[in-house]
Image (cartoon, helix red, strand yellow):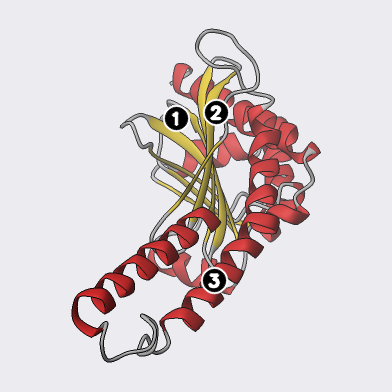
Amino acid sequence: MTKHVLLLGVVGVAFYTGIWVVLNGDNEPTPFTRTGPFFPLWFVCLLIAVVSDAFIRPAAKRAASAFAALLSNEAGQLACKVTQQYGWRANLRTTTSGIFHGRRTTVLVFQQPRISYLKLEMVCLAPWVLDIRRRNLASKALAWVGAPLETRDEALDKAVVIQGDNETAIRKWTTQAEVRLRILSLFQMGGITSLTTVTGSEGEPVLRAYYSRFRPRFFAQAHAAIMLNDLDGLAASAEAASDRR
């Protein structure tokens, strides 16, 4: 990001110098006499860029790298590539993708000044539409629009709000001992906000774990393995439920 801001400064200097030489060389003492707030604003942007590159970018890369180290690409090579890309809206996208236990998996750490989240997606051929959210006022309000599913498991119902298009099958699935533990692990230890079945970026069905207000600097890298294994276990059990239908 710093190099982009520096490049903008160079372009600005060249532009004002050109205008000064062509039009105002005889009237203004320097090319920057009437630049107004341009350079103070540029200097503030430069400071923000330096801070971002020194603290925000490395933290996001470390978080994504914790997942990348556990993935393999299609050729079987470990340590998949982590890429970072700045957008014009002051956002930073840190991504990686690969294969985990035979499932295509993608990781996105997205950061803006007021928004930060982690999105972990794994291919899953679930037989139903599933939406599990951390229990709070917002999820309760959203559940009123549909029909929240009560599992009759005290710990699970206290932690999350569950909705789906097959109440009987989903209740049976979520109350399996292994499934129950993995869901609680993702929400309580992994810190995720929601777990949903959606269509992935390449049109494939995926199981998505979403972590809002994600703070890469405070992410325990050991949690990457736990989250991947939990998501993989849930995807496998959901597909097994489809095979038993």
User: Label 2 neighbourhood size at 10 Å, few (<14), some (14-19), many (20+)?
Assistant: many
Towards the viewer: 213 or 63: 63
Question: Considering only vertical position in the picture, is 227 above or below 103?
Answer: below
Determine whether the residue tagged by mark 1 lies in a helix, strand or loop: loop
In the displayed structure, 168 sits above or below 19; it is: above
State the mark number for residue 126: 1
Q: CA distance from mark 1 to mark 2?
A: 7 Å
Residue 114: mark in rendering: 3
Q: Quadrant of residue 203?
A: top left
Residue beneath the point at 50% across and 83% down: 40
Residue receiving disc 2: 235
Going from N to C along the chain, the mark reached first, 3 or 1, is 3
Give me the residue at 57% from left, 27% from top. Answer: 81
User: Residue 130 appears at what percent x and percent y?
Assistant: 46, 44
Total number of numbered labels?
Answer: 3
Q: Helix, strand or loop at disc 2? A: helix
Q: Tell me where residue 179 sits by quadrant.
A: top right
| Residue 6 image position (x, y, % from top left) | 49, 60
Tell me whether circle 1 and circle 2 mark residues in contact (CB < 8 Å): yes
Does the image show residue 239? yes
Q: Amino acid at mark 2?
A: Ala
Is disc 1 surrounded by few (<14), some (14 to 19) or many (20+) residues within 10 Å? many
Query: Which amino acid, mark 1?
Result: Ala
User: Could you tell me residue 87's position as x and y percent?
Assistant: 41, 55
Q: Nearer the viewer, mark 3 or mark 1?
A: 3
Tell me if I can see residue 213 in this picture.
Answer: no
What residue occupies the far left of the structure in this picture?
Answer: 23
